[in-house]
Image: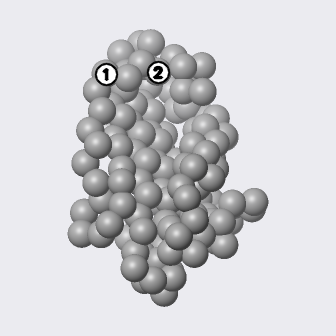
């Protein structure tokens, strides 16, 4: 799924989410041209549905990315965000997160290059990872 973007994983870091129960993994990658690409997948399981709602809402408030709208077909609620920047290269980012009961899953994908990777391309891949992650977590 990410290989068709020409991404190769260089290393991973399975550091869990900070300050809450759950699991996560950071994938540090390179494009075929040697530019940095990163994906973080995070699944958090707060103790209650209300705590999960608060976590989900806080992400939208602190992300620093532009809202890209709701995402249908996954969880009780889901939305996406985008960002284009030029930190020496053109860097495109897409983040999507969803809440199902007390499960909150976030997928963030960023890819650098000489030109911006189309956000639609990042969105398709991040949404696939989100859906697969949500469906692989057993119901509480």
The residue lying at 75 percent from left, 60 percent from top is 73
Q: Is residue 11 visible?
A: yes
Q: Secondary structure at mark 1?
A: strand
Q: Nearer the viewer, residue 44 or 120?
A: 44
- The answer to whether marks 1 and 2 mark residues whose Cβ atoms lie closer than 8 Å is no
The image's colouring method is one colour
Relative to 14, 130 lies left or right: right
Toward the right, the furthest residue is 73
Toward the bottom, the furthest residue is 50
Neighbours of disc 1 within 10 Å: few (<14), some (14-19), many (20+): few
The residue lying at 25 percent from left, 48 percent from top is 15
Q: Nearer the viewer, residue 66 or 37?
A: 37
Residue 60 at x, y percent in the picture: 48, 71
* Residue position marked by numbered label 1 in the rendering: 10
Q: Nearer the viewer, residue 6 or 119?
A: 6
Question: Residue 34: which numbered mark, if any?
Answer: none
Residue 55 at x, y percent in the picture: 42, 75
Relative to 78, 111 lies left or right: left
Neighbours of disc 2 within 10 Å: few (<14), some (14-19), many (20+): many
Q: Quadrant of residue 126?
A: top right
Relative to 13, 80 lies left or right: right
Residue 34 at x, y percent in the picture: 36, 15
Q: Is residue 43 above or below residue 30?
A: below
Q: Quadrant of the N terminus?
A: top right
The residue lying at 53 percent from left, 70 percent from top is 140
Q: Secondary structure at mark 2?
A: loop
The residue lying at 28 percent from left, 54 percent from top is 16
Q: Is residue 91 visible?
A: no
Q: Nearer the viewer, residue 6 or 114?
A: 6
* Residue position marked by numbered label 2 in the rendering: 7
Q: CA distance from mark 1 to mark 2?
A: 9 Å
């Amino acid at each position: 799924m990410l290989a068709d973007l020409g991404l190769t994983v260089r290393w991973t870091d399975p550091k869990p989410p900070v300050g809450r129960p759950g699991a996560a993994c950071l994938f540090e990658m390179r494009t075929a041209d040697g530019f940095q690409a990163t994906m973080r997948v995070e699944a958090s399981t707060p103790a209650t549905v209300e705590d999960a709602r608060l976590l989900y809402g806080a992400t939208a408030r602190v992300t620093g990315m532009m809202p890209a709208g709701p995402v249908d077909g996954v969880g009780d609620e889901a939305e996406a965000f985008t960002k284009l920047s030029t930190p020496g290269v053109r860097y495109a980012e897409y983040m999507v997160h969803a809440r199902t009961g007390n499960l909150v899953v976030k997928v963030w994908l960023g890819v650098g290059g000489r030109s911006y990777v189309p956000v639609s391309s990042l969105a398709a891949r991040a949404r696939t990872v989100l859906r697969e992650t949500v469906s692989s977590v057993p119901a509480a």
